[in-house]
Amino acid sequence: TDLEESQCTGLIAPVFTPFNDDEQRTLNLDIIPEYAQYLVDAEITGVLINGTTGEGTLMTTKERKMVTEVWTQICSQTHQHLMVQVGGASLPDVIDLAQHAEQKGANSILCLPELYHKPQTVDDLIRYLQIVGRAAPNTPLFYYHIPSFTNVNINMGMLFNQVGDKIPTFKGIKFTSTLLDEGVAAVKAQDRKFTVFLGADTIMAGAYTLGFDSAIATTLNIFPEHGQRILQCIKEGNITDAQSIQDELNAAIEAITKNGTWVPTMKVAMNLLSPLNLGPTREPLKPLTKDNVLEMKNELVKLGFIQ
Amino acid sequence: TDLEESQCTGLIAPVFTPFNDDEQRTLNLDIIPEYAQYLVDAEITGVLINGTTGEGTLMTTKERKMVTEVWTQICSQTHQHLMVQVGGASLPDVIDLAQHAEQKGANSILCLPELYHKPQTVDDLIRYLQIVGRAAPNTPLFYYHIPSFTNVNINMGMLFNQVGDKIPTFKGIKFTSTLLDEGVAAVKAQDRKFTVFLGADTIMAGAYTLGFDSAIATTLNIFPEHGQRILQCIKEGNITDAQSIQDELNAAIEAITKNGTWVPTMKVAMNLLSPLNLGPTREPLKPLTKDNVLEMKNELVKLGFIQ
Amino acid sequence: TDLEESQCTGLIAPVFTPFNDDEQRTLNLDIIPEYAQYLVDAEITGVLINGTTGEGTLMTTKERKMVTEVWTQICSQTHQHLMVQVGGASLPDVIDLAQHAEQKGANSILCLPELYHKPQTVDDLIRYLQIVGRAAPNTPLFYYHIPSFTNVNINMGMLFNQVGDKIPTFKGIKFTSTLLDEGVAAVKAQDRKFTVFLGADTIMAGAYTLGFDSAIATTLNIFPEHGQRILQCIKEGNITDAQSIQDELNAAIEAITKNGTWVPTMKVAMNLLSPLNLGPTREPLKPLTKDNVLEMKNELVKLGFIQ
Amino acid sequence: TDLEESQCTGLIAPVFTPFNDDEQRTLNLDIIPEYAQYLVDAEITGVLINGTTGEGTLMTTKERKMVTEVWTQICSQTHQHLMVQVGGASLPDVIDLAQHAEQKGANSILCLPELYHKPQTVDDLIRYLQIVGRAAPNTPLFYYHIPSFTNVNINMGMLFNQVGDKIPTFKGIKFTSTLLDEGVAAVKAQDRKFTVFLGADTIMAGAYTLGFDSAIATTLNIFPEHGQRILQCIKEGNITDAQSIQDELNAAIEAITKNGTWVPTMKVAMNLLSPLNLGPTREPLKPLTKDNVLEMKNELVKLGFIQ
């Protein structure tokens, strides 16, 4: 891989992991080719696996590797950019997953911070990412900033200003936060040296206006056209349309998420609104009740997303 | 005052309170007419007094009334909208200040939450605002959401959805937070019934794109043209210019605030960059060292804000 | 006052402020002599006024001074130690209250941190206390550590280790927190140079065992014998009794506080269980419903506190 | 195992996991028999493995099982109570570890909450513990409350009051917090039905006075006599000695922990003060510098812990 050439920017769909509706929620790997084709048809050129949407931290290392192997094989054909989330496990497992991802040909890796012995300082975080980076020395590395899940609140502009060349493969972050001032400062830091993927579906139009040009957003699975059109409208200075598409998307998100937490409600919505059946979520994510599913469906009909 | 007619929207400058450079930091009321004219010349049509920038919580009730009296008199001539911040004191004092503001002809009042016995729920907050509203029954009332100072984190969309007609004068909020998803949800709530003033200088372009149309931002004192042009550019779909003006403003903000906390650095910058001398800040705000002031000046020269 | 001689240790009752049951909740100063005598009869030798229990931050400066004047006069006769809480207002008012307390003969002052422009570092806090200390240069000064209300979380051991002789009148703190490791470290710091008043009613027996010897606790108003006996038992090594008295007290506290927040429920309990009628609390404290009062009464009957 | 008979109370040492000083920090299982004998000689009758002190979350599932297998075998001979921490990994791994612990004969299991999809409510936590409990239906289950690491702040008294018989094997918690009021309420809840192991070394004397009778504390490895004597002194009403032993222990803890974070400094201290060499800690725990180790040694000499 030539790091200089790898284009790690743009819109990436953080994919769901398909499970069977059995007691163990076993992997349904067979549906992945169809899922990849669905995204290709929707002009989604990048895929993140084993992230939050993909329930990566709810799978064993072995399962995460199986998912990686299927997606690397498919993406070598679809030419989609494949990013693999390797963090959220014990460090020996994280190293193992990073090595595996590189060996299988992932285009980039994304890594959560240590969840238990959390980094307290920028230096702590850099030390951790150095270890992960050394395990996959030829693969661009991104840090996964998602303080609402990790309670790690290290300022991302400070990370960019202090990382220097300490981590040769470090290319940027997934910024899953709605604190836009911190996000914008990160985008602009070091002459825009690093890529900052926005992970906040409801404020994309504002973030793009402030200089963001990349996103990894769950709704790119379910409403791929919305996310793409918002970015396009902002590029064209069409704020009226950008805002109305964002409003439409936000109404859908509210209709979906009022029925439970993010991942389970989004997975139900994906099953309702796409031709795919990606199955249930795993414990301890709380599954929706039948009433919740029905209410979501009714609201999505009302909003015109379901005929 | 006819509530229906009062236009409480647009760009408002939260003014500094001028103090003399004596031991008590006594009020320098004499300079206020000149200050008002400076803002009129800069096309700033609204003024907030006794807010955070105005060190309202660092003054006695008597002093806050004196400031109110001078500004109400001047604004009756300049026809600027005058908003008075009445909170951040004991509730009897808050009631007294609200009555006084209405009696002197303030166009609207803004109110912090109780700082010690903080509201824990939306209901607690509504009860508090009802009491304040009853003290000024003919004056539009705004709630001052600024969790970084108050540690009151009540969701503003929920406030709008639950307030109903419980507070007849309630018209909206000052949203001093960079959590833009919460801000946008508030803007859109109840069919945009309420005004949401943005209080976050570095992300204005993004907020306007997402539907904000009003702001109360310290830098409207120092760089009034920047804030106004960003809003204008977004209205016109000129994102390129909006972004570059926002970038220029953010560079200035960084040069200023790296030398101390928000209010003292901004007051020094105002004294450096405007023709006015508004004096020092009060304790316990930490005054800048001479070195800090020099460094700020040098950076502002480098950025072209000082010749 | 000779600072060397003033004994600022032991058990102090943070008294309620008596209000009339009128719309303004006006001060009922007339009942204070009777209240003081009630405490004398209960062998309570120290009194804190205008604290949290005393709704100090819900009164105007003028009212706080009136309360101070009545209590200083009475305590000059009862020889109770009088501590006056002067913080939680604008700094000019805090300075005024500190000067007034000294002038009227208070034995010590207690001071909250600035509530809006909160101290971020130990140095910030020391600077604030220096200002307050200079306003009352002959009166022992205590800092009021109560992070659940102030969100100021500065470590108290660090304050003691860094304060040196920067504040000549500084004598210690009221530690209203249940983080006992921090409390014990403060007690032991600098060879026990400073007094640490415990402000946590339910863990007194444990704190005394770890080295605390002083407390300012609301329940010393209502159950003065319990607090005194727990301290006595620990001094005598009678852990069995200390624990059972603490258990009894904790059962009462639970019966009381399950019906609302701390101050309103405690004031209702005081009115139920003592011969005094100290009236209602002020807004925005939420008054108890009649059902809450009845339930509290029934539980206190069941526990044997009411015949 | 007969649940009724298993005595899960008293003092338990949370053991370090011995690693070799090689690059991978491989397991040094050979030293474990010697370690167990050291604890037996110190009259420590219970052992917790794979906890925080044991770096459990920094090991793979396979390594955690290897450690479990060695200790179960040894404890079957030493008759020490063996508690195995099975949480802090993906739920499939947690289930696997719980099954394995039961199968190998662990006397009890301890479980962290899910670290990424954290429980938000008592119900969420109960659902999680039900799943873990079903995986080891014949082994007493304890919940590991350690909010400073997990950011899960569910009130433990509420857990006890709501759990009912929903988790047949649930027996109590490890309470690693210094909020003693919450701890005491948990100890007393439901007529002391549940065991609450204190996980706070510096306040043991206070906690025992308030009714705690059990602890799992790192310093039971290094200073086993101190922890045991504090409990004994409190049982005998000898508060003077309890306090002076606690003071001595706290001085040692301060001398140790001022040189880094808890686990790395404690492991260094264990290597310095015991006859065992348990090796280094794993990344991302930050190892101590040589200067830190020297300073710790010097202070421990000064305090008389090293001749």
Image (tube, coloured by chain):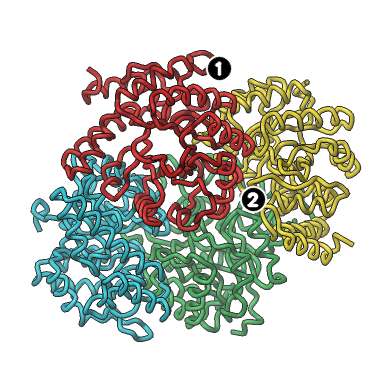
Chain colours: A yellow, B green, C cyan, D red
Mark 2 belongs to chain: A
Q: Write down the quadrant of residue D307 in the picture.
A: top left
B211 relative position to A93: left or right:
right
**Image quarter for residue D95?**
top right
- Say if residue A118 shows up in the picture: no
| Helix, strand or loop at mark 2 | loop
The location of residue B268, given as percent across then percent down, is 47, 51
- Badge 1: chain ID: D
Q: Quadrant of residue C32?
A: bottom left
The residue sitting at 58% across, 76% down in the picture is B170
Q: Are marks 2 and 1 in contact (CB under 8 Å)?
A: no
Who's the residue at 36% across and 54% down the image?
D188
Q: Is residue D93 left or right of residue C11?
A: right
Marker disc for residue A178: 2
Image point (54%, 53%), residue name: D166
Residue beneath disc 1? D24
Residue sitting nearer the eye, B32 or C136:
C136
Q: Position of residue C82 (x, y in %)?
A: 17, 65
Separation of disc 2 and disc 1 at Cα?
39 Å
Crowding at dot 2, Cα within 10 Å, few <14 / some 14-19 / many 20+, comes out as many
With respect to residue D230, does C213 lie above or below?
below
Local SS, label 1: loop
Type of the residue with mark 2? Thr
Q: Nearer the viewer, residue A272 or A303?
A: A272
Image quadrant containing the N terminus of chain A: top right
